Image (spheres, coloured by chain):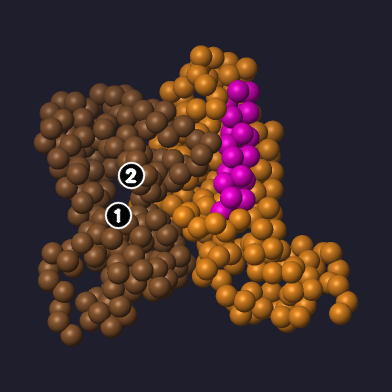
Chain colours: A orange, B brown
Amino acid sequence: MARKPDYDREALIDAARDLFWQQGWAGTSMKDLERVLKIKPGSFYAAFGSKDALYGLAMDRYARDGSARLDALAAEFGALGALKRQPMVVVSGAGQTRACMLAKTYVEFLGTKNELGAKAAERLSQMESRFAALFAAAQTAGDIAADLDPKLLAQRYQSDLVGLRIMAERADVDATALAQAMADDLDRLR
Amino acid sequence: MARKPDYDREALIDAARDLFWQQGWAGTSMKDLERVLKIKPGSFYAAFGSKDALYGLAMDRYARDGSARLDALAAEFGALGALKRQPMVVVSGAGQTRACMLAKTYVEFLGTKNELGAKAAERLSQMESRFAALFAAAQTAGDIAADLDPKLLAQRYQSDLVGLRIMAERADVDATALAQAMADDLDRLR
């Protein structure tokens, strides 16, 4: 069976990411994947090997895109500006799942030994390091107090973001007000 | 088949809560339940009807206990004192799952139509109302500023708590420092 060209493969991984992100690992059947990716079982296994292997690729894609978005925000608004904009950005995507895919995956596999849970934890740690680097850069720029610990700030920030993004899924929660409150709090670190 | 006496039923629901809390809904098989509850399939269905029905009871139990614990903290330490102690309490249970069972369940069923997801959201809303009542009481007591919105404070607080409890599962996160930072932040509401 001929291998799908790369551009097609990339689009399939994007589609799988969106499906997994929305429905979770257990909630996404092989039938769902075949339907959404418009791919037959034989081609699926030839291209990706297994559902779990594709899930791993989808998470990598998700993390890569999140990281690139943060870079773009930092280039435009500076370190503190990027950290302040991030909460609003992640809850305002129209029609998009608001809960973080890495946190969803991490939670789904808590208490199990599936390697995807460990992979999600690893990607969360990497994202935390990105946040810590931004907090350190904000200190260098004189935008936040120099005596604060960037690592602890980053863990608190990621924790708040994980909570915000889950709460933002609820119809009775004012996600915009929460995101704004989170951004405003960063000004108190000066 | 004789119905189990009530005290036994209560203990079974407690055991099911701990198992579901740790392993999640999809991660808990009927075989797991039969093994941990030491109950045969016939007795299980006679007593609880279905896995989902028991999961619902387990969530009710979890929410009831969480509510009672908060009441006890408020009786001993006052409204603000209870809100300040809660983060440390929920991450310091030895050997206990740290992530909130309601949040775990809510996340597990996001993007699905299982009623347990809606039930988890409802219980989270009820807990949010409890937090709002405590923030209002803290205002009445003069412990936090009177111009803040107790509902928004409660949503932010619950969001932070949900994030904290998920992050606290990670080995590379300083859960105690995070919980302390969250408690300290409440002093800034004066």
Q: Residue at x 69, y 64 (%)?
A: A54
* Residue A125 horizontal side relative to residue B7, left or right: right
Q: Residue at x 61, y 56 (%)?
A: A115
A121 in relation to A75, above or below: below
- Place of residue A10 in the rendered image (x, y in percent of width and height, measured from the top left): 77, 62
Residue for badge 1: B124
Q: Are marks 2 and 1 on the same chain?
A: yes
How many numbered callouts? 2
Q: Chain of mark 2?
A: B
Residue for badge 2: B158
Q: Residue at x 71, y 80 (%)?
A: A41
In front of the other: B134 or B62 = B62
A31 in relation to B37, above or below: below
**Element under label 1?**
helix
Mark 1 residue type: Leu
Instruction: Kindly indicate whether the residue at mark 1 contacts the one at mark 2 (C-beta within 8 angstroms).
Output: yes
- Place of residue A13 in the rendered image (x, y in percent of width and height, measured from the top left): 71, 63
Quarter-wise, where is residue A140 in the image? top right
Q: Which residues are magenta?
A: A117-137
- Place of residue A69 in the rendered image (x, y in percent of width and height, measured from the top left): 65, 44
In front of the other: A35 or A72 = A35
Number of residues whose C-alpha sits closer than 10 Å to that of mark 2, classed few (under 14), some (14–19) or many (20 or more): many
Q: Residue at x 26, y 55 (%)?
A: B62
Q: Chain of mark 1?
A: B
In front of the other: A66 or B14 = B14
Residue B104 included in the magenta stretch of the image: no
A77 in relation to A18, above or below: above
Quadrant where the N terminus of chain A sits is: bottom right
